[in-house]
Amino acid sequence: SSTPQWLESWTPAGGARRVRTLFSQAFDGDTPDGVWFAPGRVNLIGEHTDYNAGLCLPTALPHRTYVALRAREDGVVRLVSAQTPHEPWEAKLSDVEPGSVSGWGSYVAGVAWALAAAGHEVRGFDAAVDSCVPFGAGLSSSASLEAAFAVAVDDVDELGLAATDAGRADLVDACRRAENEIAGAPTGGLDQSASLRCAEGQALLLDFRPGLSAVESGRPVPFDPSTAGLELLVIDTRAPHALVDGQYGARRASCEQAVDLLGLENLREITPDGLEAALAELAPHDADGILTRRVRHVVTETERTARFVDLVSRGLVAEVGPLMTASHASLRDDYEVSCRELDLVVDTAMAAGAVGARMTGGGFGGSAIALVPRDDVERVANAVSRAFADAGLPSPAFLAAPPSAGAGSV
Ligand code: ADP
Ligand code: MG
């Protein structure tokens, strides 16, 4: 059918009720010390810029992972999740190290391991997890899982990190290390920063230039589409991510090759005004034009992100649409990371009244976003659902995404 499927977010009370019930079922009627949550995220603009010392602009979803947790004194971690009901997980914290654990609990135990490695005293715990962040949709369910545990452990073990932005930057680092070194998934910190450092009605401008402190590299930016009568929609295409790993590596390699040929440290050193000269310098080494297209995307994407931030900082939210759509065209034509489903969402949403739309995340599937006048939301969702049905594609899922709070306690 082509009726739009909405993926509703839970209220904090609803999320807390779920994990408290799951906790008492899994752990003999016990009650947890508390309930904590952390959101998934979506990137508004600035794609494939993180590993190029550029800018990006994530915002937190109202869709969150919830955790009910109770500390233990024996250093054991026991976990259950409503999303993996047949995979309860258990380990001793002292046994956790790179290569020693696997499965979904490695994201969680990895956070405790990284905090301990940073010199904090961390106890074991029993915990129950439930989440309305879809897995593998490019909305960072993994970072929301890590961040929910980071603030829970921070609270029960009285680390005091979640109380300040500088402390949250330390929690980001622990979550990033957990995912890289214990779960074994490469990630640059964008997702964890968004989940831990975003706030309601805001986006987070992340600057990946080397040499900035963690606090300097993240700056809140006001972003509230409702003030302009707009809504932010996220559309999970549910497209299978084919060939993503190789494609991602190939894009990074092209960027590194261009940096080497130009004798630079990173592509951020190319200013928008210097782009033509840089491309001319690359041309003799770039018969197929690939380096030209990749570099052009990276340089113009950081410039678009800066312009987006400038507009929303001046209260001109309704004017960012063309920057989003230009970002999509650049990702599709120059960076070549879009796919049929993502292009179909963007083209259909724009034709049905969106003021801007683009793929978000790494590409080749995952999700798209659209900024839509409030009164056109149903029409856009209907049009996208119908277009997918007509094309014989699986139904996409829609998420309403007002910029929401970062990780905290319920
Ligand atoms: P995403 O884009 O959603 O972050 P990832 O592949 O990075 O996709 O992370 C998804 C993985 O994170 C899942 O396969 C699972 O191992 C783990 N995960 C995330 N949320 C949960 C949860 N609520 N319960 C159990 N595991 C989870
Ligand atoms: Mg992830």
Image (tube, rainbow, N blue to C red):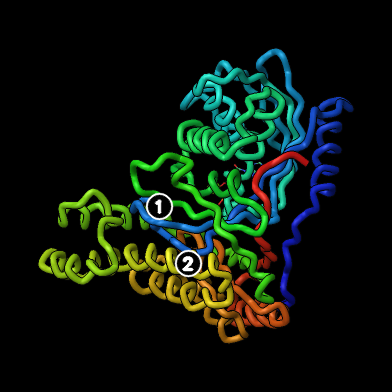
Mark 2 within 8 Å of ligand 1, using the beta carbon: no
Q: Which quarter of the rendering shows the N terminus? A: bottom right
- Of residue 388 and residue 337, the one placed in the foreground of this image is 337
Tell which residue pokes out farthest to the top in this image.
74
Query: Can you identify the residue that label 1 sits on?
Result: 50
In the figure, 115 relative to 332: above or below? Answer: above
In the figure, 212 relative to 230: above or below? Answer: above
Q: Amino acid at mark 2?
A: Asp
Mark 2 neighbour class, 10 Å CA radius: few under 14, some 14 to 19, many 20 or more: some
Total residue callouts: 2
Instruction: Tell me: 30 left or right of 295.
Output: right
Residues at circles 1 and 2 in contact by the CB criterion of under 8 Å:
no
Where disc 1 sits, the SS reads: helix
Q: Amino acid at mark 1?
A: Asp
Instruction: Tell me: 291 left or right of 287.
Output: right
- Of residue 309 and residue 407, the one placed in the foreground of this image is 309
Instruction: Tell me: 261 left or right of 328.
Output: left
The residue lying at 23 percent from left, 48 percent from top is 265
Give the percent coordinates (x, y) of residue 27: 82, 27
Where disc 2 sits, the SS reads: helix
* Mark closest to the chain's N terminus, 1 or 2: 1
- Looking at the rendering, the quadrant in which ligand 1 lies is top right
Q: In whole angstroms, how far apart are the C-alphas of marks 1 and 2?
A: 19 Å
In the figure, 331 relative to 167: above or below? Answer: below
Tell which residue pokes out farthest to the left in this image.
284
Mark 1 neighbour class, 10 Å CA radius: few under 14, some 14 to 19, many 20 or more: many
Mark 1 within 8 Å of ligand 2, using the beta carbon: no
The residue lying at 44 percent from left, 61 percent from top is 46
Give the percent coordinates (x, y) of residue 332: 40, 72
Give the percent coordinates (x, y) of residue 289: 21, 70
- Residue 190: which disc? none
Query: Can you identify the residue that label 2 sits on?
Result: 310
